[in-house]
Image (cartoon, rainbow, N blue to C red):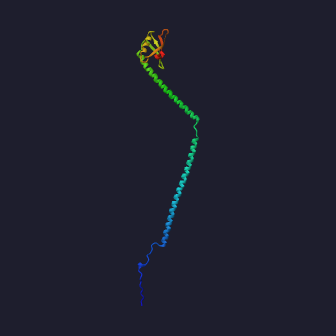
Amino acid sequence: MTKQTVNLYSSHLLPPKLRLSFKRLMVTSAVMVVVALFIGMGLAWQSSQRNNEIIAAQAQKSTFDLKKQQLEAQIAARQPDAALVAKVELEQKRLELKQLLKGELSARRSEVSMGYSPLLMDLAKVSDSSVWLSRIHVNDGKYEFEGYGSTAQSIPMWVEKLKGTETLKGYSFASMTMNRGEDKPLAFKLTSTPVEESVQ
């Protein structure tokens, strides 16, 4: 007699097989822990480097601040050399005097140029062959003439013509001296002053 068995359970009734086993779970967890550990170590190293850089920068700043304070103290303590200051002031005064002298000389040169040029032109207009000049001097608006005349009459005539010039208009000749040496022409010296001064 043959015994027959009937299987009433089908394969779909069996529990599904799990792909993630306990062993795989442990391995995955271990890998994740190792990765997390490396990441933490890297972040800690970077943080340590940044802290070291900050500490070094602060130390360098403290050094610079100390040097700055020392330099400021040296500058504050340094006083100018009195002898050097006096020398500089003396040179400045000399320069000012030289500039004033230069300006004065320029003004006098201009005054002399303005005084002589018109005078020479007027003297050329009243030139006389019987009178000739040996010296002309101009000082503070006063004129002095020295020269010679061939005759005693020629000098007063020349002086009258001289008074009519533009340069000597308004002037009078306060003094006139004449002298004749042996075998020499008549020497004369004229000194002119403005009419206003002669009136006073």
Above or below: residue 11 compared with residue 124: below
Q: Is residue 135 visible?
A: no
> Is 77 on the left or on the right of 145, as rendered?
right
Using the rendered view, name the quadrant where residue 84 is placed: top right
Whether residue 43 is visible here, answered yes or no, is yes
Residue at the image point whose x is 56% and y is 48% from the top? 65
Q: Position of residue 180 (x, y in %)?
A: 49, 9
Q: Nearer the viewer, residue 175 or 150?
A: 175
* x and y, in percent, of residue 2 in the image: 42, 89
User: Which residue is painted at 42% across and 79% down in the image?
Assistant: 13
Position of the N terminus by quadrant = bottom left
Above or below: residue 85 compared with residue 176: below
Residue 145 coordinates in the image, percent (x, y): 47, 15
12 sits left or right of 100 in the view: left
As displayed, is residue 63 above or below residue 158?
Answer: below
Figure label count: 0
For the point 56% across and 34% down, the residue is 85
Residue drawn 49% across the image and 66% down it? 32
Res 75 → quadrant: top right
Q: Which residue is the extreme one toward the front?
A: 200
Instruction: Give the residue furthest to the bottom.
Output: 1
The picture places residue 125, in percent across and down from the top left corner, at: 40, 16
